[in-house]
Amino acid sequence: MDYQKILDEIYEETRPLLGQGRVADYIPALAHVDPKKYGIAIETLEGGCFHVGDAAVPFSIQSISKVFALSMVLKVLGEKLWTRVGREPSGGAFNSLVQLERENGIPRNPLINAGALVVTDCLSSITENPLHRLLEFVRKNSDNPQVNYDSLIANSERETGYRNAALVNFMKSFGNIENDVDAVLNIYFHQCALMMSCIDLAQAFLYFANGGRHPITQEQVISLSQCKRVNAVMQTCGFYDESGEFAFSVGLPGKSGVGGGIVAVIPKMLSICVWSPELNPKGNSLVGMKALELFTTKTGVSIF
Ligand code: GLU
């Protein structure tokens, strides 16, 4: 398969869509990004790397970070995690509070904010210095020691993060947060403010395409069973309230973030990351969704 040719074609065919979405501005520091940035990177399990456009430019990975924290926590806690967070699509907004009241502070899944905050709380309980460990984790799996947090973005989110603060406090009232509320929020805002490029993210996601083993480090990051489960949760819950549409039109497990990044994997083959900061009304990268749809159409690959 000539991945470079396919990427070049997709890039040209989708560029006319730039300008049709809206950059996220509810976190003020995110609003400063150049809306016309656009890159795609593919990493194959055999070591191939193909890219186009701004694939080497770091951006705010936001919710994509949730699957890294989830991997670290699952590895240590295993099945115990599922007593504190479910694995059903929520059918609601990513930052919604409403289900939590009815469901006794147990979030529907680890990829909505409430669930991710519980995972961050777990990370805080199982490690001495969670921010340091998370950074080590992403640097190792992306093979890029330069990956770092953007403290301006983290602070900007802290200053406006009333809803996330409400979620942690609410869950604490149900006994589903073990650590100090401000400490959990601080880790969460930083993990969302990790800056990584499409190339970094495609590389970091390779273990999800390879049964949990990273093909470059040869480390078993998570078990085969945990890998299947995280992929299943990404498939059903990874795209806000558009996860069904993503499964329908792209057909791959993946995760998006409000920074405009989307990473998806084709098990046993490759990982692909697209970044275009303008979002569609559901909060997913407008151009990114279309690019990935074209990718699975042109290559004919799908998990179905
Ligand atoms: N830091 C963002 C928030 O919690 C993450 C949103 C996202 O990418 O889904 O609001």
Image (cartoon, rainbow, N blue to C red):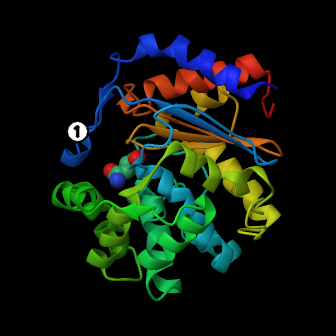
Image coords of residue 51 (percent x, y): 60, 34
Q: Nearer the viewer, residue 271 or 241?
A: 271
- The residue at 52%/39% (across/down) is 262
Q: Residue at x 54, y 64 (%)?
A: 138
Residue 184 visible: yes
Per the image, label 1 sits on a secondary structure element best described as: helix
Q: Is mark 1 within 8 Å of ligand 1?
A: no
Residue 249 in sight = no
State which quadrant residue 40 falls in: top right
Local crowd at mark 1 within 10 Å, few (<14), some, or many (≥20)?
some
In the rendered image, which quarter is residue 109 located in? bottom right
Q: Does residue 246 appear to the left or right of 172 in the view shown?
A: right
Query: How far from the left and from the top, in percent, is residue 5?
Result: 69, 20
How many numbered tags mark residues here?
1
Q: Quadrant of the N terminus?
A: top right
Q: Quadrant of the C terminus?
A: top right
User: Residue 121 location in percent, x, y?
Assistant: 44, 75
Query: Is residue 119 placed above or below 87 in the rendered structure?
Result: below
Hey, what amino acid is under mark 1? Ala
Residue 56 in the image: above or below residue 208: above
The answer to whether 202 is drawn above or below residue 163 in the figure is above
Of 125 and 141, nearer the camera is 141
**Res 260 → quadrant:** top left
Looking at the image, which is closer to me, 32 or 125?
32
Residue most toward the left? 159
Judge by depth and name the residue closer to the eye, 129 or 95. 129
Q: Residue at x 53, y 43 (%)?
A: 198
Compared with residue 73, is residue 261 higher up or lower down, i.e. above or below?
above
Q: Which residue is mark 1?
A: 31
